[in-house]
Image (cartoon, rainbow, N blue to C red):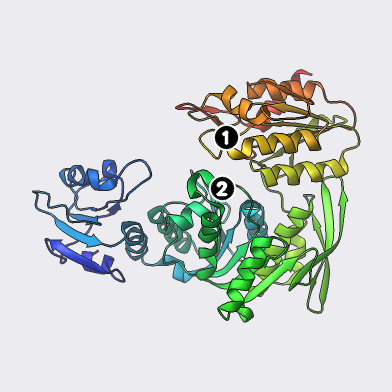
Amino acid sequence: MLLEKLLCNIDYCVTKGELNIQINDVKYDNRKVTEGDIFVCIKGTKVDGHNFATDAIERGASVIITEKELNINYDYTEVVVKDSRKALAIISANYFGNPVEKMKLIGVTGTNGKTTTAFMIKSILENEGIKTGLIGTIANYIGNKEIKTERTTPESYELHQLFRQMVDEDVECCVMEVSSHSLELDRVYGIKFNVGIFTNLTRDHLDFHGTFENYYKAKYKLFENSYYKVINIDDKYGERIVEELLIKGEKDRTLSFSISKEADFEGENITINGVLSSFNVINKNDKHKISLQIPGDYNVHNALGAIGATRILGISWDSIINALKNTVVAGRCERIGYEFNKNFEIINDYAHTPDGLENILSTARKFTKNRLICIFGCGGDRDKQKRGEMGEIATRLCDYVIVTSDNPRSEEPIEIINDIVRELKLTNYEIIENRYNAIEKGISICKDGDVLIIAGKGHETYQILKDKVIDFDERKVVKEILERR
């Protein structure tokens, strides 16, 4: 493709070379550059791509996209832009032929609930006969084909590459989790969403955003680029989003959902039967009973967001009802080990924030006949302030807690654990640093009617220890332990 076409819709200045050249591919990692590529210099949190421009040229890059004049003594084309992250997003879209314009796109953002809401939407659309793609935390999907993923929202180049694959495989609609990192780092810059959904906003990622206000502003960017907005107004930040949208004259394209207030989509008569739940949804003159495979008010919120988005797209109530009663999401209030017919429940959940942990434990308490036991830890190299808060929540809501490792990353596991327990007032806990041993101990103390929550890792099948990534699938761990009992 001609360089000039790749730069369409970008303000730029050519400080060296020419535009009339063919481009092979687009790269932002100098180690992957081959002959005839564009290299886009990106400033990261740890390294600056501008420092690797010379290496990229030596590897064959014919064009350098930069935020400043580099004046490297080689024969190449230099294009200066104001923001290279935004430029990468637009160049990537142009390179792959702007595939996102050929699909309907639904974005889901919020601290918790993105994955569950996205899978609910995918299930509903497929029940309606619509081939659907999904981009998210667990994996990316093109219809039923699973593609492993490293982050919730891919970098802009990989994102548009995935959109291209979806369009080539006749995907009509894509639902994607939109993380605050991706919004702040412009991975989704230039993308217009048909529908944007807000689930909630609670403490997380402050190690990256610095302040809660910055975190909120990052999330809000999705709704500046969504035609329709579907907002949880039971969350105070959801109310704020609606208020700001109304001021901008967006009333007709902003829909709300709630389980406690008047809204466009209201959930009422919520009932929990073990790990199942049901509720009535009211939308204008329509009232329908919805059954879910997962419990909790927070999952009713997730379902209402999915219902709102799919009704906007004209999906039938029959498809919504049939899909939701069968939707199960890996690592989201997931029953594991049930095939061994024990008289206690083991539930695996991704809860890794204070709000997420409180939600799953409060919900589990409602169907716990005897003791509620929790195993959890906190991730390393992440917001340290939430550690003590999560320890307080666990010891307050549970009969017994085992504090262990999560993904310690570069930190010492015991130091993370000490942060969790340092200021605890209750003593109904013990420390078992090794996560396998912690799960083994948790299962060994379970009695009839107990519920054991293994929180923090959910769908993950690995554990990050220093610079090593080891296999660690909690479904397999639980099965192995139960087989020995």
| Residue drawn at (42%, 54%) of the image | 185
- Whole-percent x, y for residue 188 in the image: 45, 60
Mark 2 residue element? loop
Q: Which residue is rendered at x = 40% and y = 56% of the image?
A: 156
Instruction: Please name the residue shown 74% across and 54% down the image.
Output: 299
Q: Is residue 267 left or right of residue 34?
A: right
Q: How crowded is mark 1: few (under 14 residues within 10 Å), some or many (20 or more)?
A: many
Tell me the quadrant of the picture where the C terminus can be found: top right
Which of these two is toward me, 369 or 472?
A: 369
Q: Position of residue 453 (x, y in %)?
A: 75, 35
Instruction: Name the element at disc 1.
Output: loop
**Residue 170 location, x and y as percent?**
50, 64
Amino acid residing under circle 1: Gly
| Label 2: few (<14), some (14–19) or many (≥20) C-alpha neighbours in 10 Å | many
- Tag 2: residue type? Thr
Q: In this view, does 408 lie to the left or right of 335?
A: left
Q: Is residue 443 above or below residue 134?
A: above
Lower sequence index among marks 2 and 1:
2
Quadrant where the N terminus sits is bottom left
Q: Which of 478 and 230 is in front in this view?
A: 230
- Whether residue 20 appears in this view of the structure is yes
Q: Where is residue 362 in the image (x, y as percent from the top left)?
A: 80, 44
| Quarter of the figure with residue 368 | top right
Residue, disc 2 = 137
* 275 to the left or right of 119: right
Query: How many marks do you count on the picture?
Result: 2
| Above/below status of 410 relative to 118 | above
Q: Can residue 336 be seen in this view?
A: no
Q: Nearer the viewer, residue 480 or 242?
A: 242
Among the 4 quarters of the image, the one containing residue 26: bottom left
Find the distance from the CA under tag 2 to the CA under tag 1.
16 Å
Q: Mark 1 points at which residue?
A: 379
